[in-house]
Image: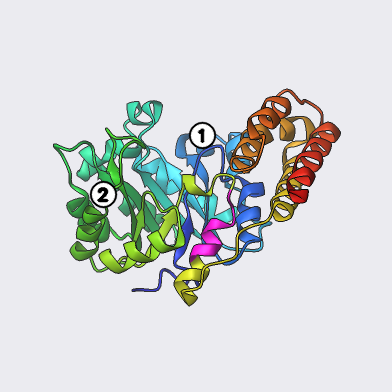
Amino acid sequence: MTKIIGLNSNVFLAPMAGITDYPFRKAVANNRNVNLFSEMVAVNAINRKNPKTYRIADVRNEPYPVIVQLVGNDPYLFSEAAKLVADLGAYSIDINMGCPVKKIVANNSGSALMKDLCLAGRIIESTVRATPLKVSVKFRKGWDNESVNAPQFAQMCEASGASFVTVHGRTRAQGYSGQADWDIIGKVKDAVKIPVVGNGDVSSPPFAKQAMEKTKVDAVMVGRAALGNPYLPGQIADYLASGIQSAPVSAVQVKETLLQQLADMADYYGENMAVAISRKHVCWYSKNFRDAKRFRETYTKISDYPTAVQAINDYFSVQERG
């Protein structure tokens, strides 16, 4: 297992658009040592000085390292964006070559780049030349089952100057359906000398440990399993270090975490927007509690901040009492 660009943890929180913003990163960071990503930053938007994109990329005030992920298809725009995000506090830069979303792929970005190794290599090289920051690449098993090329793609990334790679064990055609293929992730590990992060279906500490032992990858990345469960990446890190499972998270802890995240969202976005954004998070946090459906139906109709705080307090206080 190889240490990754000076980072202390071998667990990563996956970059997720609309989710891994500052308030959510803070919630995960508060629950132990995990490597954190920004949301995707479009290179064309940040080069246009788009205010929203600039804010997503600005991680200067966060007390922990944040890897900023770039997405696009133009090598020159990548090089310019790399300089900008370096000034905005990025610890290192990741290039998204795995996003399966239609509008990203239609722009010849994300996982579409797995079909064009020449362009993908030029993007990586341009980004590496533009900044002293380390550059990594996140990609998938392949475009579809007829064009699985993750090991070859990883070798191209290594030759182009990538410091490490992250492999999601699904094809673009799969999206997020079916099971992740950890055999292909193991083949990627065998194909390169740089560190490899495995991604896909990492939903528990034992699974993470088994996957790492099977494939010999250097780290794992947690994605959708962390929704409503910002404790999971830290629990995995602890388990990998000690072999001891963390105690179940109590309703009190969930309430405190959710209220703090809501407060951080209010500071970051303003109260009205915070309430709107919090609806999806509240649905995820309440997933395994009693009367969750009724609570979700009530909460999604709330539009003001004090009522939202009171609703969370009331619901989880009932859960605490059993």
Q: In this view, does 129 lie above or below 273?
A: below
Nearer to us in this view, 171 or 298 = 298
Identify the residue at the far left of this view.
146
Q: Give the side of residue 141 with respect to residue 212, left or right.
A: left
- Name the disc covering residue 214, or none: none
As displayed, is residue 26 above or below residue 55? below
Tell me the residue at 46%/39% (across/down).
Answer: 43
Find residue 118 and report its horizontal and vertical position in percent: 20, 44
Which quadrant is home to the N terminus? bottom left
* Horizontal relation, residue 165 to residue 317: left or right: left
Q: Quadrant of residue 315 in the image?
A: top right
Q: Is the magenta stretch mostly helix, strand or loop?
A: helix
Q: In which quarter of the image is residue 4?
A: bottom left
Residue most extreme to the front:
322
Task: Sort mark 2 into few (<14), some (14-19) or many (20+) by Cα contacts within 10 Å.
Answer: some
Label 2 or label 1, whichever comes before in sequence order: 1
For discs 2 and 1, the disc positioned in front in the rendered view: 2
Residue placed furthest toward the bottom: 242
Q: What element carries label 1?
A: helix
Badge 1 is on which residue? 45
* Magenta-highlighted residues: 229-236
Q: Which mark is residue 181?
A: 2
Residue 1 vertical placement versus 286 (above, below)? below
What amino acid is found at the position of numbered circle 2 in the picture?
Asp
